[in-house]
């Protein structure tokens, strides 16, 4: 029973990271119907930003985290302005191919700058187990879970209560109508990319601290699993991304503990296929009819 509870906690920790990254996918898709396959590389860039700040300064972990999120947000907005904005009215396949191209560009840019050898992330969080009876929770696991929940709550409040958040919802519902109502769509899209990239960087920093390494291709597999989480929960829906992230994290952790670590990825992607066969819109998604 203790082992099972331990795995549940680990699953929630991993799932919270996937949920943070999945939020970037689902927010961008909800606004401009683009699957930003470069989002995993934004996560990687966020981890490298934190690594550089940590080894060159003596800043505490909260400031390292804030600076890396800000820099990732700027990178996300710059990427949107350079690569995606010119294709705003182009066919979706053009933007999708561009996203894949941006992904490879950022990977290879990191490879040129930092080389292929993994960098060891400094110990930004003191690793000390906290005992609750026979159950032991690592400080990294606890910090990851708490920070993820806090930022998800902040995002929910931002989207529902603030003017930019309401503008994001309006653009998501009907971009043309939002423009007629005086909403600056370009600025709203830039804000969406900034927030999604900052959350991706948060996930990247927490991921690199958990697994202690930073390397150019580190965003590939977490990015794919976060995309699976977004689709599983319902692409374009913020609650769906959160739910999908936690579900994927739990399934991955439990399968590694009780089945096989080699089969865990296959189980995760197999789950996506099963869900899409029976409910293509995802767990929380709803079928919508389009008028022709």
Image (cartoon, rainbow, N blue to C red):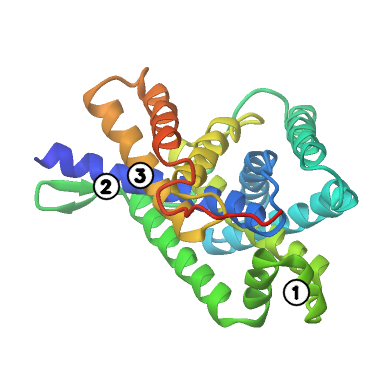
Q: In this orientation, which residue lies closer to the viewer: 217 or 129?
A: 217
Quarter of the picture holding the N terminus = top left
Of badges 1 and 3, the one in the foreground is 1
Upstream in the sequence, badge 1 or badge 3?
Answer: 1
Residue 46, given in percent of the width and then of the height, sits at: 64, 48
Q: In this orientation, which residue lies closer to the viewer: 13 or 180?
A: 180
Q: Secondary structure at mark 2?
A: helix
Q: Secondary structure at mark 3?
A: helix
| Tag 1 residue | 178
Of badges 1 and 2, the one in the foreground is 1
Mark 1 surroundings within 10 Å by alpha-carbon count, few (fewer than 14), some (14 through 19), many (20 or more): some
Q: Secondary structure at mark 1?
A: helix
Q: In this orientation, which residue lies closer to the viewer: 84 or 11?
A: 84
| Tag 3 residue | 247
Question: What residue appears at the point 33 percent right and 54 percent down from the top-left corner?
Answer: 142
Q: Give the quarter of the image for residue 120.
A: top right
Mark 2 surroundings within 10 Å by alpha-carbon count, few (fewer than 14), some (14 through 19), many (20 or more): many
Mark 3 surroundings within 10 Å by alpha-carbon count, few (fewer than 14), some (14 through 19), many (20 or more): many
Upstream in the sequence, badge 1 or badge 2?
Answer: 2
Query: Does residue 77 sit above or below 227 in this rendering?
Result: below
Residue 126 shows in this picture: no
Of badges 2 and 3, the one in the foreground is 3
For marks 2 and 3, give the CA distance: 12 Å
Query: Does residue 104 sit above or below 174 in this rendering?
Result: above
Of the numbered discs in the image, which one, if any, rests on residue 9?
2
Query: Does residue 100 sit above or below 36 in this rendering?
Result: above
For marks 1 and 3, give the CA distance: 34 Å
Q: Give the quarter of the image for residue 163.
A: bottom right
Question: What residue appears at the point 39 percent right and 43 percent down from the top-left corner?
Answer: 14
In the rendered view, does 247 fall on the left or right side of 77? left
């Amino acid at each position: 029973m203790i082992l099972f509870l331990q795995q549940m906690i680990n699953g929630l920790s991993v799932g919270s990271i996937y949920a943070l990254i999945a939020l970037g996918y689902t927010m961008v898709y909800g606004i401009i119907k683009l699957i930003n396959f470069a989002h995993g590389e934004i996560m990687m860039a966020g981890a490298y930003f934190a690594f550089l700040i940590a080894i060159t300064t003596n800043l505490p972990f909260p400031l390292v985290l804030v600076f890396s999120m800000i820099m990732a947000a700027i990178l996300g907005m710059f990427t949107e302005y350079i690569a995606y904005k010119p294709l705003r009215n182009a066919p979706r396949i053009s933007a999708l191919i561009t996203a894949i191209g941006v992904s490879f560009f950022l990977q290879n840019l990191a490879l040129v700058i930092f080389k292929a050898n993994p960098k060891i992330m400094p110990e930004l969080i003191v690793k000390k187990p906290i005992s609750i009876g026979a159950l032991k929770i690592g400080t990294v696991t606890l910090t990851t879970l708490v920070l993820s929940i806090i930022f998800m709550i902040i995002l929910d409040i931002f989207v529902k209560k603030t003017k930019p958040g309401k503008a994001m919802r309006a653009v998501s519902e009907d971009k043309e109508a939002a423009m007629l109502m005086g909403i600056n769509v370009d600025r709203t899209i830039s804000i969406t990319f900034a927030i999604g990239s900052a959350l991706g960087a948060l996930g990247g920093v927490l991921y690199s601290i958990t697994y202690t390494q930073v390397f150019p291709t580190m965003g590939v597999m977490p990015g794919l699993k976060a995309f699976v989480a977004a689709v599983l929960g319902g692409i374009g829906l913020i609650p769906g991304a959160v739910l999908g992230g936690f579900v994927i994290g739990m399934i991955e952790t439990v399968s590694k503990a009780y089945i096989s670590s080699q089969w865990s990825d296959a189980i995760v992607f197999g789950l996506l296929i099963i869900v899409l066969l029976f409910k293509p819109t995802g767990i929380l998604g709803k079928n919508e009819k389009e008028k022709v």
